[in-house]
Image (cartoon, rainbow, N blue to C red):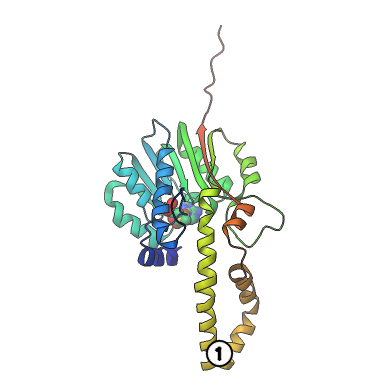
Amino acid sequence: MEIGSICGRHFLKLKHLHYGYWTDGLEVDAWNLHLAQDEYVKFIISHIPDGVKTILDVGCGTGEIAETLLNMGYEVDCVSPCPFLEKQAGELLGDRTHIFECFYEDMQTTNRYDMIMFCESFQYIDVEQALLKTNEFLKNGGYLFICDVFAKGKKGKGVMGGGHKLDKFNDHITKFPFRLIENIDITEETAPNMDLFGDALKNVIQPVTDVAVRFFKSRYPIATKLLKWKYRKKFEKAQKKYLEGGRSGEDFKRYKSYQLFIYKKDIQEKTQPAH
Ligand SMILES: C[S@@+](CC[C@H](N)C(=O)[O-])C[C@H]1O[C@@H](n2cnc3c(N)ncnc32)[C@H](O)[C@@H]1O
């Protein structure tokens, strides 16, 4: 993620770490990815429920979404377990926010929020732990807001990792007092990112890897042979995972599903029986 952030920011002017949301008319091209990411933020903001004032941004990445929310008048706290990203977000947000520098699973606070938001960070957190913590930190009547990739759990699951299994997530959430109030499938709008990624692997990463291997082979033939033998399983795995295809928008639509879920925490107050 750190490497992605450094390269993305330098070469493609990317401020965010999430997928782009490709609207009609936006040409699917790496140079437009920053515009598609901005569309993703607009999509997120347009779905924040009315009445929300305080937000916890879990996995805030570079802090750019939090900054937009702060500028709109929301009070925002952030969670960031990655020191590199935490530093970037800290520099951007200054003292307008509190950043909990820890994994969400380890977060401790007495604060209670109107909304807890996971923008492409839910997939990295154990589902049970994420829901337990969210139940603890949300006010009653508050919102759990998840926008992320889920795995459909199809047979022959493809080479793409990432995303909790949708059916398991749906099972887990029934144990908590969260009521689904909105669900939008944005797989179609996010799948083009995988076409761009697949294209970069095929036309940049693969040829660059080939050149590097050729170079080392000619300079250090014995050491290259030894390394290739010692790490053959890892090389084979990486080759299969990243360089043999299977990462297109169509593959993404087959095996993954990108969903916005908004749940409302509803704990029914016990009413006293009438006498
Ligand atoms: C793909 S980035 C998304 C960043 C940002 N939300 C955005 O939309 O640009 C995933 C984020 O999740 C964070 N993350 C990963 N594991 C986490 C965990 N266990 N608890 C909290 N955040 C986590 C990473 O540090 C990173 O900021």
Residue under the image location 64 percent in, 75 percent down: 236
**Considering depth in this image, is 236 or 53 the residue closer to the camera?**
236
On the question of residue 103 being in view, the answer is no
Residue 148 locus on image (x, y percent): 52, 49
Q: Quadrant of the C terminus?
A: top right
Q: Position of residue 166 (x, y in %)?
A: 62, 46
Q: Residue furthest right?
A: 155
Picture coordinates of residue 2, whole percent (x, y): 43, 64
Q: Quadrant of residue 206?
A: bottom right
Name the residue nearer the viewer: 71 or 192: 192
Query: Furthest-left residue in view?
Result: 95
Q: Quadrant of residue 91?
A: bottom left
Q: Please tell me whether residue 8 is drawn above or below residue 58 in the rendered image.
A: below
Seen at 54% across and 20% down, the residue is 270
Q: Which residue is mark 1?
A: 217
Percent x, y for residue 107?
A: 45, 48
Compared across the picture, whether 149 is left or right of 88 comes to right
Above or below, comparing residue 97 to residue 274 in the picture: below
Name the residue rendered at 61%, 67% in the picture: 245
Nearest the viewer among 45 and 129 is 45
Residue under the point 61% across and 73% down? 239
- Crowding at mark 1 (Cα within 10 Å: few <14, some 14-19, many 20+): some
Q: Is residue 91 left or right of residue 1?
A: left
Q: Which amino acid type is marked by label 1?
A: Lys
Instruction: From the viewer's perspective, tell me whether residue 134 is left or right of residue 240.
Output: left
Asked if the residue at label 1 sits under 8 Å from ligand 1, the reply is: no
**Residue 160 position (above or below residue 270):** below
Decide which of 211, 179 is in the foreground and name it.
211
Residue 56 horizontal side relative to residue 267, left or right: left
Does residue 25 show up? yes
